[in-house]
Amino acid sequence: WVIARAYEVAPTARRYEDWEFPYALVLGQAAAARYALDVGVEAARSRAWGLAARLRAALGTIPGVRVLDRGVTRCAIVTMTADGRHGDSIVKALKERRINTVSSLREFGIYDFDAKGIETAVRLSPHYYNTEAEVDEAVDAIRSIVAN
């Protein structure tokens, strides 16, 4: 997907990657579903969404960081960007601190990214097994990364 109403087929064998069946991912998803059922789906949702709200509020206090989430109901995926920083560089710096995140690029969501005026973003997804201290650690790490 390159612009709002056009796509280009990848010129290499990469164009076929979506057709491979991810057995390991399916098995992992089944294990995660069993774990969530043991904890209780409502309890898991409530906990994860609460941690995400804590994360959004704290990220919003960091100069140059913008939380991108919109909508009335916000889930446990928190999306942010930092002035002058590519999402990949933030993800790399967080990985060095053993904090797992992923970057998102404009080509993954052209309408949304263009509306927000961004090229890259960082997605953080606190889960019900995370602690408040881990959320705070991620915020402190981001504060440090964007200050340098």
Image (cartoon, helix red, strand yellow):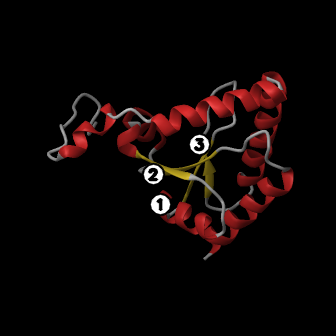
x, y percentage for residue 102? 53, 51
Q: Which residue is mark 1?
A: 88
* Element under disc 2: strand
Q: Which residue is depicted at the point 69% across and 36% down?
A: 76
Tell me: 115 left or right of 74.
left
Which residue is label 2 attached to?
A: 120
The amino acid type found where label 2 is placed reads Thr
Asked which secondary structure carries label 1, the reply is helix
Query: Can you give x and y, in whole percent of width and height, for residue 41 in the image?
Result: 78, 23
Q: Is residue 140 left or right of residue 124?
A: right
Mark sitting earlier along the chain (3/1): 3
Q: Quick check: can you spot residue 86?
A: no
The quarter in which the C terminus is drawn is: bottom right
Check if mark 2's residue and mark 1's residue have beta carbons within 8 Å: yes
Mark 3: amino acid = Leu
Q: CA distance from mark 3 to mark 1?
A: 16 Å
Rounded to the nearest angstrom, the CA distance separating label 2 from label 1 is 8 Å
Rounded to the nearest angstrom, the CA distance separating label 3 from label 2 is 11 Å
| SS category of the residue bearing label 3 | loop
